[in-house]
Amino acid sequence: MTDRSLLILPGDGIGPEVMAEVRKVINWFGTARGITFEVSEDLVGGAAYDAHGTPLTDETMEKAQSVDAVLLGAVGGPAYDDLDFSVKPERGLLRLRKEMDLYANLRPAQCFDALADFSSLKREIVSGLDIMILRELTSGVYFGEPRGIHMEGNERVGINTQRYTEGEIARAARSAFELARRRNNKVCSMEKANVMESGILWRDVVNEIHAAEYGDVELSHMYADNGAMQLVRAPKQFDVILTDNLFGDILSDCAAMLTGSLGMLPSASLGAPMENGRPKAMYEPVHGSAPDITGKGLANPIACILSFAMALRYSFDLGDEATLLERAVESVLADGARTADLMGPEGGTPMSTTEMGDAIVAKL
Amino acid sequence: MTDRSLLILPGDGIGPEVMAEVRKVINWFGTARGITFEVSEDLVGGAAYDAHGTPLTDETMEKAQSVDAVLLGAVGGPAYDDLDFSVKPERGLLRLRKEMDLYANLRPAQCFDALADFSSLKREIVSGLDIMILRELTSGVYFGEPRGIHMEGNERVGINTQRYTEGEIARAARSAFELARRRNNKVCSMEKANVMESGILWRDVVNEIHAAEYGDVELSHMYADNGAMQLVRAPKQFDVILTDNLFGDILSDCAAMLTGSLGMLPSASLGAPMENGRPKAMYEPVHGSAPDITGKGLANPIACILSFAMALRYSFDLGDEATLLERAVESVLADGARTADLMGPEGGTPMSTTEMGDAIVAKL
Ligand SMILES: CC(C)[C@H](C(=O)O)[C@@H](O)C(=O)O
Ligand SMILES: CC(C)[C@H](C(=O)O)[C@@H](O)C(=O)O
């Protein structure tokens, strides 16, 4: 028996395809290294809706709460676009984040040297890029009440509420400062304190936590619109970017795209420590369900495999094994292994999803 | 006497410096073409705060309401960072937008061929880029109530409200469709309808206006996070982008930066037609007050001059004169005229603000 438990939620679209490759990696660690996981699997998103009429059943939610780490593929797709808001596939994802209280979403934006030419940015602007966005994930306008569409006179009005408490900001800030200490010791916090009071509170609390506990970390502040510009202009100026749920959604996608390797980028969503000392955690690729390529064997499994590497590091204290897996990925790329998303205009025959998974396992 | 009235609000930082160059252009049109303007000037932002303790006096507000067009330089600067939110320089700008009801903010992102190499993006991705962002400017989270910071138990909580009425969305959508008809007939609308009900209403109303009145225009929808990615990946896929106040703030800055020419980009903020048929209007460069270069003669006056060109076109029906001015700008750039922001790594001696203004007037 192992004391490492993992719930796999492949989800929709290419989710199940990339997850099958992660399974190979998990098996390799068991066979070759004796590092085993107790793996269970369940439905989420559109797949859960099709089976149960809800994007996340209470049973799945309970399982997610009881394991060490959840590994999620992707949710959603055009088949679900006309569903009622309350049962959209995204609600499954948002419920997981909220009920597991995964407040710290870590999104690395890293430019793999072998792939620097895939960026739409000039090589010198992105090569060697290695920044980390810490996005607050359980509050803000995603979850604030009141919300909804109602009638005012004979007009519809759409309302959402951006809401942050001092405690919510403080714990996200602490996570960012802790991360920075293990990296290049710099945090840039982004909000719109010039137009939003929630942004003023954000800036004040970040400053307070910094002054009281993290004076050794270099801290700066930027308005989020300027942040988007600076990410495009000179992304290497950053180390850790700390921002809220909605700005984080946009800025992290923008940062991810800079690297030209969207199919390559993992994420970790962490909460408070559980009884066994491990944080509540969910890991998922940054890319979506990619309906346009689903079922064609074209999906790049690397983002999902690197998400599992983050799980090794942040949930299971297996930093060396995480590094081993990351090196294997770098190494197949350096060898020229390319899925369809990584093919240049010069063409050639891309590897399939399975072939890429096999190549990575072969390097381990 | 002329029937063209213009209120100039130079504001803070480099605002007065770039506005001085616009004055030369205005004078040229009077002298050389007999096209005259009744120009008045007043304070806004930090400058108004210093003089009157408020970033915008009621008198200035009344003047702004009574003229054909307002031309604004920039507001804000570090000297005002510690002011109370309610008197920050930005509040002057926001009050102008709100009370003049300037709901349609037009932000072109255009890549000047002579400057394509200044972009951090590869030349082929940005050269020839010519897109227009239409940002809703008088509603959303910038103005929604309730808002503020209050105590809940012994914790501070920051709150803002994202709020859109059907009518507010509809008029912004109409402006976007009208613009598209005069361009390449395509509108892409961006929101977060997957997580925000206000985004669902946004998407529904845009679809309804499209079906009822603009079936000839090609319409698509994108989530704002994907929109940010697509702007970086392949910005030329867009023609007109329609989005709300907060997303528009971030996405338009991101788009502006793509061109590598932030000191080059103008904007127009338009409202409903006045009695004389002209729309309520304010024009301003996209760049800010640039405190780091204030007073050094280094500012690029082109964004402000091109904002005046937009005024010629949208307020005064002087499209030919606007084109004349835009051509003069292109022509000095093609000649190699460069302010400091447009100098490449190879160096050289930049032109001053004044020299650039003179060079443009000389080309007219
Ligand atoms: C799918 C969607 C709900 C989600 C979000 O907006 O958070 C996604 O864009 C993300 O960033 O994980
Ligand atoms: C200065 C600030 C209030 C303003 C905004 O957020 O709208 C600016 O960023 C802009 O885009 O004009």
Image (cartoon, coloured by chain):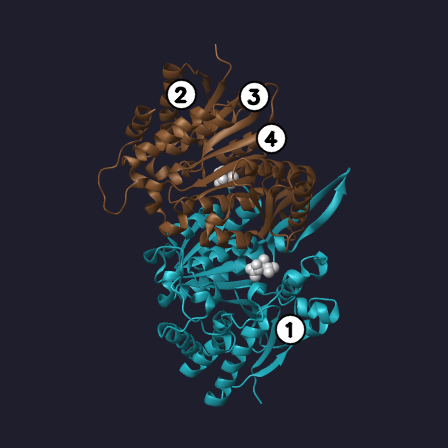
Chain colours: A cyan, B brown
Q: Amino acid at mark 2?
A: Ile
Task: Quarter of the image for the C terminus of chain B: give it.
Answer: top left
> Is any part of residue B345 visible from this angle?
yes
Other residues around mark 4 within 10 Å, as few (<14) / some (14–19) / many (≥20): some
Q: Which residue is mark 2?
A: B26
> Is any part of residue B10 visible from this angle?
no
- Where in the figure is residue B59, as x and y percent of width and height? 54, 20
Q: Amino acid at mark 4?
A: Asp
Q: Secondary structure at mark 3?
A: helix
Other residues around mark 2 within 10 Å, as few (<14) / some (14–19) / many (≥20): some
Q: Which of marks 4 and 3 precedes in the sequence?
A: 3
Q: Is mark 3 within 8 Å of ligand 2?
A: no
Name the front one of labels 2 and 1. 2
The Cα–Cα distance between marks 2 and 3, rounded to whole angstroms, is 23 Å
Q: Which residue is mark 1?
A: A65
Q: Which residue is mark 3?
A: B62
Chain identifier of the residue bearing label 2 in the image: B
Q: Is residue A107 left or right of residue B128?
A: right
